[in-house]
Amino acid sequence: MKSIPSVPSEARRRIEVRPDQTIALGPRADAPVEVFSTPSLILLLELAAKDLLAPHLEAEEDSVGVSVEITHTAPTPRGGWVEATARLVAVQGRQFDFELLAFDAAGEIGNGRHRRAVVSLSKFEDALAKRTSPRTEGLTPTLPAVPATVAVRGGVEAGVARLVLNRPGSLNAMDRSMTGDLEAWLAYLEHPTCPVRVVVLSGEGRAFCAGEDIKENAALDADASIALAGRRGQVCRRLAALPHPVIAQVQGPCFGGGLMLALAADLLVASHSATFGLPEVKLGWPPAYTLDAVVARVGRLGARRLALQGETWTAAQALELGLVDRAVAENQLPSEGARAVNDVLRLPALAFAETKRLLADLGPAGVGGDLGRTLDAYARCRRHPDAAAGMRAFLEGRNR
Ligand SMILES: CC(C)(COP(=O)(O)OP(=O)(O)OC[C@H]1O[C@@H](n2cnc3c(N)ncnc32)[C@H](O)[C@@H]1OP(=O)(O)O)[C@@H](O)C(=O)NCCC(=O)NCCS
């Protein structure tokens, strides 16, 4: 700017109200009541403010409106005159605040406040070009690539993502590769242009998931094991936070981290062969994450029975105590899963997502709201010699 205008100072504009500055009122199109319109009043006031700044600007600068608040208090007829006054009352850097006042022949017709900013025209034109040119490559929404994973076998068809935990030789125990695969799938599912409508989680072979891979854990140092548990906690939290419906289809053992994964789903369908437990305490540590999801389902009492007393629940018990939503015969699990998918596909996606979010935000228990504290407890215990002894006992087949 060449100079800063003094405060206070004023600029005025006066016009005679033309037909294109009026709004036609009343029911008769052939004989409307024509009065000075509010947008025309705003423009007139804004131009008065612009006039005040103009002599102070460099050649490649101009002023633009930032905000306007106006009250239009009286009508002015077509052909009448209106005078607008913009009074500069404050300057802050390149921003200028005005008080506005407008009169016609009969008196005041409006007042208000207005802020303008001085901009460099070249920068302004750049910003304008970005908004008017067609979307460039970087902005064009691209579909994310479907992850190619092995420890989780996955595919997407007709809006349904099917993720199959795929380490049947060890009852789909969750190792590092499965953790990484689940993270890859979550990144895909969380992508804003992901075409998935429903996620179905299941296990290959006779189990859903026997929890974390104890053989792998036994070979890791405590820090690596704790870091891995933290990642798995995030996997459960992110899975539960997906806006899509998530359905877990569970058969056979569903233990420890496997149960936490299943409980991150919105609907848990189990076959009669399913068994559920949280045997971590026997190994020498507490559940490392999302115990809140267990409490949300079966309350503290149920969580105590699973996590402290080491109970293993059958599908029937799990259904009765609210840990699962449905329990069906083994051979009906696929068809029951398919029915659940069809049911949720019929629901409006936005309404489902909003309701899911509301339920997650309500009340004390969510999924993963307490990750820090549970992981700390796991870390303390995983570093203790009892943990090594517990894993040794499992590996030697003594505490199953
Ligand atoms: C789930 C369970 C009750 C099923 O018992 P089962 O039907 O008799 O099956 P097995 O114990 O023979 O397990 C089958 C195979 O999977 C392996 N396996 C099962 N759970 C495993 C785990 N969590 N980590 C690594 N390997 C596991 C077994 O070592 C066995 O492998 P092998 O055939 O090479 O010996 C039993 O495997 C078990 O207690 N697993 C551990 C559960 C657990 O503590 N999870 C960790 C919580 S964080």
Image: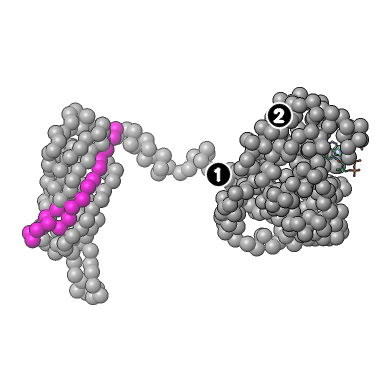
Asked whether residue 205 is drawn in magenta, I would say no
Residue at (48, 43) in percent of width and height? 135
Q: Can you give x and y, in whole percent of width and height, for residue 179 in the image?
A: 73, 36
As shown in the figure, which amino acid type bears the numbered disc 1?
Pro
Residue at (15, 50) in percent of width and height? 101
Asked whether residue 114 is drawn in magenta, I would say yes
As shown in the figure, which amino acid type bears the numbered disc 2?
Arg
Q: Please, what secondary structure does the residue beneath circle 1 have?
A: loop
Query: As drawn, is 105 to the left or to the right of 233?
Result: left
Q: Nearer the viewer, residue 217 or 149?
A: 217
State how the image is colored.
one colour
Query: As drawn, is 276 to the left or to the right of 125?
Result: right
Q: Can you give x and y, in whole percent of width and height, for residue 400 in the image?
A: 88, 40
Residue at (20, 58) in percent of width and height? 72
Are the residues flagged by discs 1 and 2 in contact, CB closer than 8 Å? no
Residue, far right: 397
Q: Can you give x and y, in whole percent of width and height, for residue 126 in the image?
A: 37, 35
Of the image marks 1 and 2, the number of the one nearer the N terminus: 1
The residue pinned by badge 1 equals: 141
Q: Which mark is residue 380?
A: 2
Any atom of ligand 1 within 8 Å of the CB at mark 2? no
351 relative to 388, above or below: below
| Magenta: main secondary structure | strand
Q: Which residues are magenta?
A: 102-120
Q: Please, what secondary structure does the residue beneath circle 2 have?
A: helix
Distance from disc 1 to disc 2, alpha carbons, whole Å, reads: 45 Å
Q: Which mark is residue 372?
A: none
Q: Nearer the viewer, residue 292 or 197?
A: 292
* Image quarter hosting the N terminus: top left
